[in-house]
Image (spheres, rainbow, N blue to C red):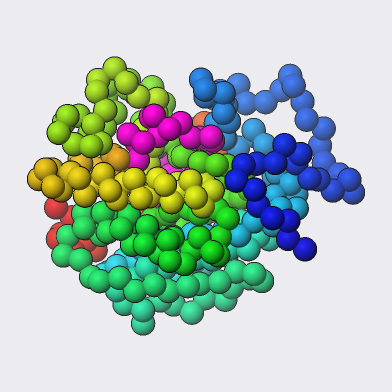
Amino acid sequence: HRKSMSPALPLTMFFSSRLKYAQPNTQQGRTDVNSVTNWNVPLVWEGTFDPVVIDEIYREMDPRIAVVVFAVGKYTRFLKGFLETGEKFFFIGFRVTYYIFTDNEKEVPKIEMGTGRNITILSVPPASRWQDVVLGRMKWATVSIEQRIRNEADYLFMMDIDSIFYNRFGAESLSRLSAVLHRAYYKNTPRDSFPYERRPLSKAYIPAGEGDYYYTAAVWGGYLEEMYKLVKYCYEQSQEDAKNNIEAVWQEESHLNRYLLYNKPTKVLSAEYLWSDYDKVPADIKVVRISQLVKNYAEVRPNGGN
């Protein structure tokens, strides 16, 4: 049976008394990285959670997980790798629906899906600029959540399709609102060197001297309604910028970072949760869970990557 999801994590975390697991330890753990933010929420790394325990807690709740991806133009070529590896590593044992937004339904590959796991295809128009694809994600995701997804999911992740899973990506990532540290800025980058939007005319503006972390917009997730608020915010703020003839420096990623500065995430995921095949893996990244693929941007993007 399925326990109803509440708008907040239940105070009692249901757990099977039959499950055996390693005793937690207050004296040992990761010492090379910080595992809590200064607003006292988890900063998740390999070695900071027990996957057996966390999966059991959430399986009792039996949440429906939605994954929203956009495969427009030549990006349909990345669907096979994303879906096949997702079926090996992404929330295995949970109910998952991949919502694929595409302008070419025929290019969506037939993938063998696990029990309780599905693909839903949603049509979107083609785009002439990659920036329009990025900004269009917020529009079409907002509309689709309103019309369909909110009736079919409890949690929602926005993900970039040009990625593949390499290792477990599971229930440890769930919270009201979970954001992922950008791999390029998570170590010792001063906040004034983050690529925030610095032009006051933009709705994504973050002034110098402010900022917590720099978050990627290639993976983010949370409760369905919290994600709806954030996706809609990014869409509406982009529309406001367009009225003023300005486009945020990193499109929805800039608006995402502005939102999360003043609406703190309830869980921060380390760069394990979105690495890049371009980059060498440092010692503090013990596990790469999902990684962006090497590609020729000039060839796959509609306006040559410019």
Vertical order, 114 against 277 (above or below): below
Does the magenta portion include 160?
no
* Image quarter of residue 294: bottom left
Quarter where residue 40 is shown: top right
Residue 198 x %, y %: 20, 29
Q: What residue lies at 32% left-to-right and 34% top-to-bottom?
A: 258
Q: Is residue 275 magenta?
A: yes
| Relative height, residue 138 to residue 115 (above, below) | above
The residue lying at 54 percent from left, 35 percent from top is: 267
Q: Residue furthest left?
A: 245
Which residue is outermost to the right?
18
Residue 210 in view in this figure:
yes
Question: Toward the viewer: 41 or 85?
Answer: 41
Image height of 223 relative to 62, above or below? above
- For the residue pair 159 and 13, the one nearer the viewer reads as 13
Q: Which residue extends farthest bottom?
A: 106
Q: Residue at x 72, y 37 (%)?
A: 11
Q: Nearer the viewer, residue 241 or 146?
A: 146
Q: If the image is split into quadrants, where does the N terminus sit? A: bottom right
Q: As drawn, is 118 to the left or to the right of 80?
A: right
Residue 254 drawn above or below residue 291: above
Q: Quadrant of residue 279?
A: top left
x and y, in percent, of residue 203 in the image: 23, 37
On the question of residue 285 being in view, the answer is no
Question: Is 252 displayed left or right of 98 in the figure?
Answer: left
- Residue 68's spot in the image, x, y percent? 44, 60
The stretch in magenta equals 256-281
Q: Position of residue 159 (x, y in %)?
A: 42, 54
156 vs 197, left or right, is: right
